Amino acid sequence: MESMEIDSERDGAKSWPDPGVPIEEGPEKSAEKPLTSEQVQNELGGYVFKVKDEIRLRRFLCLGIEKSIFHTGEVTLTLENDICNCITRLISEDGINVVKTIREFSVENRACKSDYVLFALALCCRCTDPETKEAAYKALPDVCRIPTHLFKFIKFAQEVNSKGKGWGRAHRKGVSMWYHSYKNKDGGIPLLAYHMTKYKARFGFTHKDVFRLCHIKTDYNALGYLVHHFYRRNGHREDDWQNQFNLARQNLTKHDELELKNVIDLLQDVDDAKRCRDEQLMKRIVLSRDVLKIVREHVPTSLLKSKEVWEGLMRFMLMTAMLRNLGRMSSFGLLDSDSFGETLTISKLKNSELLKGARIHPLTLLVAEKAYSKCRNNKGTIQWKENPNVRDALRDAFHLSFKNVEATGKRFLLAICMSDPENPHVNGTPSITALEAAAAMALVTRRSEKNCDIVAFSGIQSTEHPNITNFSISPEDDLDAVLDKCSKLPCAKTNIAAPIIHAFENKKMYDVFVVYTDSVNEDGSVHPSRALKLYRTRSGNANARLIVCGLASNEFSIADPEDPLMMDIVGFDSHAPTAIHQFVTGNI
């Protein structure tokens, strides 16, 4: 790895003090002089980066909160959130750009959860600016990719329009056009039929409810038949509809005729599956379709206890669904040694193209491995016998998926500090421990980033000269080797500022400091925010960032709320790596 020592000419660094002169705590909160023209003076006389509304919006779209903090728990989204005023101000200035930003975060998968972009889009759709409203409804098909997203959007739209009267013409047209938009998508209306039967109801809405509320109308036969299908048990005579479509089909083109036939065939198979009570027949229905397969959501609950049905479902199961159902399939003996299920599962897990297409982060595979190795679900209602070959394939998939992690090109200093000898489980992901999460993320960063140093807190901390040791992780190491090295680290008190002080005293240039710790019980006399600001001042790197990951914590506050280049992560889950990447690359 290239040396990251500070070169004053190359990095624009200011003169550094003697390495023996420590960073000391002072009465002021921040640096006394601005680093750039973008900084403003706060009430304490120090200079900080002002958090602009555009940054607050981007934070919200990614994290669900306008502050630089990521929580693993659910975020409650209401009109009382301060972000609503922020978005309203931005809409009044340039609503078209707000919609563009929302769409980018959704399409480019920058958001940790879809709820945040759906809530923001609902605010734009229900605003008073006609141009913003029109642009927002045009973006609806791109942001709401499946019916679950549409139902959640409708729920948010009703909440933000609580004082309004009904849906309104623009809202009815926008929601109606969401269904029509499938005509221009790969898969067409048959794909819409598949999605509508898979995601039939969410958040108090069904498709029949939505059709009634948006007054959907269409002269497109395949979509019309689909509307008929969901309305047919609501007072409409079956023979009237059938006669209408028999007449309409006389003038169809071959493409339209085929599309309508595919919709009718799929809906018939779904209805057959819904009425089915025989497990062998259900298995045949699952295996009979060439495309748009019958999936778990189409199967009656009573048949989900059948080994035969799951043997059919597993053959065409997507990667994410397979990872969620490894335990259930194992409970039926479908993943036993030398079985077809074992061969199929291992071949999928070792297929790098499937892993890439599913956009699965290594941490997700580590969590899946640990959950599978427990041999029971969280409630203890399902138990299974672990197959070592499947477990090993999950670990292989963990390492294969590293190549799918996008590099940021930044200079990293990772610091690992474990203070609890009990090695607690991660808040938000209880199937793994804090040490496992820290080791996995350190290995992911080490492999994906060209410039990455890793250190560890060890021994008794000294405020002036923190006792930090270099922690050697090679890109060739596997997770077991990294865990073995981590397990040999002595427990130490937490001093979040220590890695920054270490870089300061050794004149090292970093763009990002990341601290992984099981506890955020701050033990240093120098606050991390002050250490970071003085590091920026002395090094000349005004954009140096700090991320503090309290893996087993429920709540803490390290980041300066006025500094957009500091971030807290409370707990850790599969969404946290997205939050880290977006923060490091400056998207939030």
Image (spheres, rainbow, N blue to C red):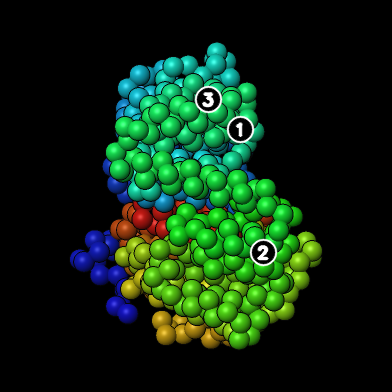
Q: Identity of the amino acid at label 1?
A: Phe
Q: Secondary structure at mark 3?
A: helix
Residue 65 horizontal/vertical position (percent): 53, 42
Q: Tell me the CA gap for discs 1 and 2.
A: 33 Å
Q: Which residue is mark 2?
A: 280
Q: Residue at x 48, y 43 (%)?
A: 264
Earlier-in-chain disc, 2 versus 3 = 3
1 or 3: mark nearer the eye: 3
Closest to the observer: 251 or 489?
251
Q: Which residue is mark 3?
A: 240
Closest to the observer: 534 or 352?
352
Q: Secondary structure at mark 2?
A: helix
Earlier-in-chain disc, 1 versus 2 = 1
Q: Identity of the amino acid at label 2?
A: Gln
Q: Residue at x 38, y 27 (%)?
A: 219
Crowd tier of the residue under label 3, counting other residues whose Cα lies within 10 Å: few below 14, some 14–19, many 20 or above = few
1 or 2: mark nearer the eye: 2
Q: Is residue 13 above or below residue 252?
A: below
Residue 197 horizontal/vertical position (percent): 55, 44
Crowd tier of the residue under label 2, counting other residues whose Cα lies within 10 Å: few below 14, some 14–19, many 20 or above = some
Crowd tier of the residue under label 1, counting other residues whose Cα lies within 10 Å: few below 14, some 14–19, many 20 or above = some
Q: Which residue is mark 1?
A: 205
Q: Secondary structure at mark 1?
A: strand
